[in-house]
Amino acid sequence: MAHYTHLFFDLDDTLWDFRSNGHEALVDLFEKHQLERYFCSFDNFYHLYEPKNLELWALYETGEISKLFLTLERFSYPLRMVGVNNNSFARLLNDDYLAIMATKTKLIPHAQEVLDELRAQHYHLTIVSNGFCDVQYDKLRNSGLIHYFDTIVLSEEVGVQKPDPRFFQYALEKSGAKASDVLLVGDNYEVDIVGAYQCGIDALHFNRNGSLMDKKSQTIINLKEIFAFL
């Protein structure tokens, strides 16, 4: 029988619907800055931005690039692709995007229902996220999630990103837990699940999108399924 006392949750696309909220924020940004002046459509802009953003985040998570480079390049790149070389404008777009995104509040289905029940059962809940501190705290506050969590651990605070073992060790120390006390829930197999396993932490892969995965991992496709593993 499982004997967890602590649950670690990733935030983006595990509890907070990053895919939907991020897309909405980009639409708002496109309209606010009249980016149709440079791109033939929002889809044209998005198909330049999104793959580059994912590529940059992968590099950031392995420590190969800085936050500053990531946040500048993800908007500089699509602008360059349409002949606009303006780093100041790219910085403005990034700042506005982060501000707009933090106001979005769509959650993954059943997130609040599950968190309510876990709190009622007296689990110690911790956020473990690779996001930036100011943005992640705004997301948690604006979407009504922050009061569920006893501990919040963000990579910018730790100085390393998941799946670095130092991140998970820091999370254990900050939450006052032993690895055997913890079940981690996350959507990114390589970052969340492999990272947790490497530190002796049990993990549930929230495979909402049906991605390929290691068949040995414990998997859920609906957050409510977590209770079967507690």
Image (cartoon, rainbow, N blue to C red):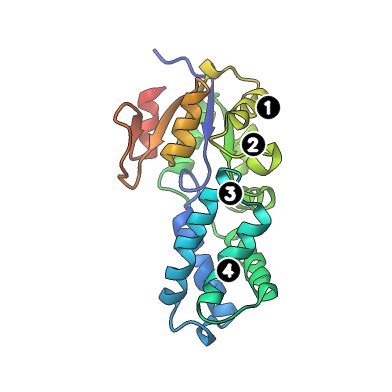
Q: Amino acid at mark 1?
A: Lys
Sequence order check: which comes first, mark 4 or mark 3?
3
- SS assignment at label 1: helix
Q: Camera-side residue: 22 or 141?
A: 22
Q: Amino acid at mark 4?
A: Phe
Residue 98: name its quadrant.
Answer: bottom right
Tell me the residue at 69%/51% (across/down): 134
Rendered position, 55 above or below 74: above
- SS assignment at label 2: strand
Task: Tell me the number on the disc at residue 174.
Answer: 1
Q: Amino acid at mark 2?
A: Val
Q: Camera-side residue: 209 or 193?
A: 193
Rendered position, 182 above or below 213: above
Q: Which residue is mark 4?
A: 75
- SS assignment at label 4: helix
Q: Position of residue 228 (x, y in %)?
A: 35, 25
Q: Amino acid at mark 3?
A: Tyr
Disc 1 + disc 2, Cβ < 8 Å: yes
User: Distance between the Cα atoms at labels 4 and 3?
Assistant: 15 Å
Sequence order check: which comes first, mark 3 or mark 2?
3
Q: Position of residue 139 (x, y in %)?
A: 60, 52
Tell me the residue at 54%/49% (across/down): 59
Rendered position, 221 above or below 18: above
Sequence order check: which comes first, mark 1 or mark 3?
3
- SS assignment at label 3: helix
User: Distance between the Cα atoms at labels 2 and 4?
Assistant: 27 Å
Rendered position, 17 above or below 51: above
Residue 177: name its quadrant.
Answer: top right
Disc 4 + disc 1, Cβ < 8 Å: no
